[in-house]
Amino acid sequence: MDKFNFCLAPGSVPTEARRSCQINAIFKYSPGWQFSLSTVQYKGSVELQQGVSGMHSGLYYFQGSTEQSSTSKNFQGPLALQSYAEESSFANKVWSDCTGTTNLNIKTNVAVTGANGLSGHMSNDIITFASTQSYGVTWRECPKPFHEAVKNQFTPGTKSDLVMGPSWATYWINVVFEVPSDYKNEQVVLLFDPGCEALVYSKCGTPLQGITGGLGGDRHIEVLISNSVKGGEVIEFFLEVALNGMFGNPGGEAGIITAPLPNRTFKIETFQIAVPNVEAHHLLWDFEIIRGIAKDIASTSQIAADAIYTANKIVNTVKHDEPSTLIAGLEIAEKFFESRKEFGYADHIITATGHCHIDTAWLWPYDETKRKCARSWATQCGLMDRFPEYKFSCSQAQQFEWVEQIYPKLFDKIKKKVESGNFIPIGGTWVEMDCNVPSGESFCRQFLYGQNYFQKTFGKRSTVFWLPDTFGYSAQLPQIIKKSDLKYFFTQKLSWNNINKFPNTTFNWVGLDGTSVLTHFCPADTYCAQVTPKEVAFSVSNNKDKEYSDRSLLLFGNGDGGGGPLSSMIERLRRLQSIAGMPAKVKFGEPEEFYKELDSRSNNLVSWKGELYFELHRGTYTTHAKVKKFNRSSEYLLRKVEMLSSISVVTSKYAYPKKELDRLWKLVLLNQFHDVLPGSSIEMVYIDAWNFYEDGTLKNTNSILFCLVEKSGNKLVEHAIQSLSEKPGLTVFNSTSWNLPSSVIEVEPKLIEGNVIQTTSNGKGLVLLSELEELSFSSGTSLYNDLGKFKTLRVNEQNLKVDGQFVLVNNVSIKEYIVENQFITLTVDQHGRLTSLYDKQIGREAIPHGSHANVFKLYEDIPLYWDAWDVEIYHLEKGWDASLGSVRIKENGPLRVVLEVEAKITTTSTLVQSIIVNVSSPVVEFETIVNWKENRRMLKVEFPVDVSCDYATYETQFGYVQRPTHCNTSWDMAKFEVCGHKFVDLSEHGFGVALFNDCKYGHAVHENVIRMSLLRSPKAPDANCDIGLHNFNYAIYPHRGTFHESDVVQRAYQFNVPPVVIPSKVKNSGAIFKTESNQVVLDTIKISEDNSGLVLRFYESSGGKTKVKITSSLNLKEAFECNILEDLISKVEIVETNHFFLSFSAFEIKSLKILTH
Ligand SMILES: [Zn+2]
């Protein structure tokens, strides 16, 4: 086909500038400058110059004049912006079209108050902080709707003169042709290979089929026009060509995970109509099966011998230049299949279901995924028309919602195929999420939004939790699965383990609380099977539970980047259905029906207790630190919004912001996808992800990228508070379900005139709060505590203890700083390392004599292949201490002491840390800023502690898990890096030490050393991953007793959920809810999905049975226990004085629906 019309779709071309990653602004600092401003805005033209050439340097300098905003009048001096991109793949590429003048708007909030109070980082006369880039041009828009795209001006062209580029752009092609009259009664196909992906539309805009060009195994370029044409008819199609392959646009030697090339071009390789040789195709599919049996089924078997004989005979019969011999070949094949049609007793039955794994973002951005869904699913609907017995299982509610919104015609088709039982929605979650990092409540919301979508759209919830590709599975999932109305669990990912082979295929997975879920790992060890005799044989030989079960599931179809099954796979499956003598009988089917059979056919299945730890991709607890930080802060922000809004609803007739909360939750859930939150996507995905959080302004330097979720969330908090407020003043809300001990908080001085005891280095007022009652608002004079309660001893210059007060630091010698309060004595050396942490109340030293704690260590971090994913065991052999820094006293009591450590930890990276001790607490806090510019190195902080125990305790979703501190077995050793949430604890009889964090997940405890992984610097698939500024906080807490006897759970929670400071007086009506025991955590308060009452979610946090009394200041009418989907289960009796009792077993999650008067 020579002629067609094409256009480059406007709006779909990626803007070059957006492909830069984080830009750090570097302000040259001159002594004497006044940093009294809070906002700096730069506008106007900035000359963009290409930096040093060469692939190893990605330094680009922007220089130009500045227009200062009204608040920045004291600020002047040259501005230089620097983009760090070591070994960046976009060097020389991205900016090549951008020389000259580019309009650049940068809004930057320096958050500087006071002469020395830089929140940013100051060293060597340079202040560095992150800035956001705002070019005023959006990244690729959503896929253009058909009716808009076809309005474009189309230009006539031919195959040879159309060169399509750059990467990620979209071309539309209109093709009209007449079917030759001599094709009458023939099957006719269009062959279209653009070298990349494409979607074929009918002339009236119905998506018909996806195209995958190129020469990969997923090649799919054939579009069926008709099985029998009339000849002479005129056919018209529109083709939307997307300039990326199934795996995006990788461009380097490292294979598909190399950072994408921005300037790829594509040419149409094939564009023609053809009459396929139907007999040849049929013989090919027959021969593939017969040859596969000959090759891959045991050579000693009768069937293999028959197959070799048959295959040989076909080869000897068919001559490529004599088409008539094809019929003879087909007859030989037919004889083989006929003779084996009588399937007797089948040893094993394989249910084969079509599947198409589409990563919601990975080596392509979210917007490309929307198109991938349309391409892949249109193809599958077409296959269902041709093969009525074919069933296709499809997960992720978010992808369905995208297709529903953007491709309504295709969605109508899908709904019909769902009704006919061919298209099977499955999974039950919003996306196939990461199962290490999200919180317990996030898990609940994944199911709540996922199941509600399936119910609303298709009239049915899913019974199978479907997660073929996620990197490890939390021990709390079985309980959450069952409480979200699902019954079964499916994956295969543990077949990738790099140390131990997982011993089971079909088993009961028993969670932390004892809930058991029937689980199947498809024994073909893939979710992209191609339907071959080899896979059938392997599904049987690799099935490790044949004694207990005679069933397996096979997922076939191309995947990861979409695609799905091809017709050739279905043709092979048709043939494999009935070949007696094969190790298994294969049938078309779908997962729910498979699990029902499995359930009824299995006996005495073995159990696996606890987490399904994935022995690979251990780096994903740490990679892309910011997405993890945003995830944590968004989870707790939405908790705050829901809690305050719910209280406002029941006490002040406030309108619950359900619609906006749904929107924000869906954004958070989307970014928990199993390649986004783990940090294993390309840079473009994170630019998109930041956009979901970011609106281009910075709130302060502690939040490098201010997030949309945060901004909108904070607005919702303000609205709820306005509704609760009565008059001016100060209120503090304790959102935890226990009384908070006396604490020190920072507030704006104007809110607490007369009560400020200490002013911080950044001009905030510090106050000492009295104990705060759980889940209640406190205000007035009772809010403040008497400092006199915190008398302590102090060490004088002669090292003698004398009476003193509060918290203070003594610089007893040039080599060390001793900080002391009523609870602890902390010794910090001149470089910021802890040499002693003495618990005065217990009389125990936490740090072994002669050791240093809070030591920053660097490790070479070069994995075997999966750069962003893996940290390998051998990295532990090549670690070294970071270069040491120096300490100064930043604040010195009476409410808190702050020591500031400043260090150039490598030749390129710097660190500034505040070590904070408050008067009222034994917890030592560390607020840390790192400017990180490394290449394949990992940063950790290490705390050797004087504690001995064979296991350490790590927080997980709604509970904790314990893991070994030794390497006795290969299973212990494989856990050399593990996931923990807000705390890790190492305790022995009588004493323990816990390490808290506010955004970190990668941990390890080996013998007596607690390590926390802080930052990595992989170069694929994002060449700029983690380069730039990072803020994170952690804390160390020495405590009495074992972990179980301690309040580590509560302290770590408080570290993440500090009291909410409200700048007005709120009616104090006592505790909204009061739980009698701290063992039970009230984690969530929200308005029910049906808007009829409150939903409360509790969990038992200590690992033991308990019964708690819960009282409320609200006027309770009725209470019901419900599941996560808010289905009512049983009534809870309300005792007349507005209290009720709840019983919990170990780690039980309990949801209640409460109706108030
Ligand atoms: Zn995946």
Image (tube, helix red, strand yellow):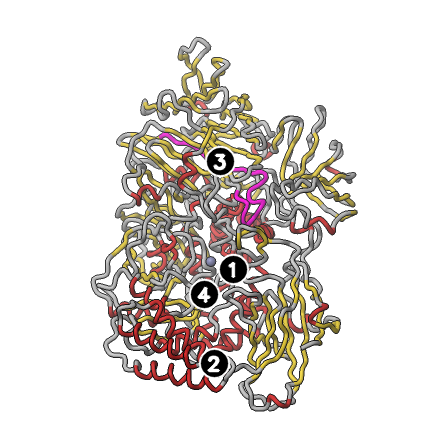
The circle on residue 395 is 4
Q: Check the picture and name the quadrant holding the N terminus.
A: bottom right
Query: Pointer 3: what residue?
Result: 939
- Is residue 149 at all visible to an observer of this figure? yes
Q: CA distance from mark 3 to mark 2?
A: 65 Å
Q: Amino acid at mark 3?
A: Leu
Task: Give the extent of the magenta segment.
Answer: 1018-1038
Q: Where 818 falls versus 871 (above or below)?
A: above
- Residue drawn at (32%, 68%), measured in percent from left and top? 297
Q: Amino acid at mark 4?
A: Ser
Q: Check the picture and name the quadrant holding the C terminus.
A: bottom left
Q: CA distance from mark 3 to mark 4?
A: 37 Å
Where disc 2 sits, the SS reads loop
Q: Amino acid at mark 2?
A: Lys
**How far from the left and from the top, in percent, is residue 124?**
64, 26
Q: CA distance from mark 4 to mark 1?
A: 11 Å
**Residue 344 shown in magenta:** no
**Is 412 on the left or on the right of 553, as rendered?**
right
Q: Earlier in the sequence, mark 4 or mark 1?
A: 1
Q: Earlier in the sequence, mark 3 or mark 2?
A: 2
Cβ–Cβ below 8 Å for labels 3 and 4? no
Q: Which one is closest to the eye, mark 3 or mark 2? A: 2
**How far from the left and from the top, in percent, is residue 362?**
53, 56
Q: Earlier in the sequence, mark 3 or mark 4?
A: 4
Where disc 1 sits, the SS reads loop
Mark 2 lies within 8 Å of ligand 1 (Cβ measured)? no
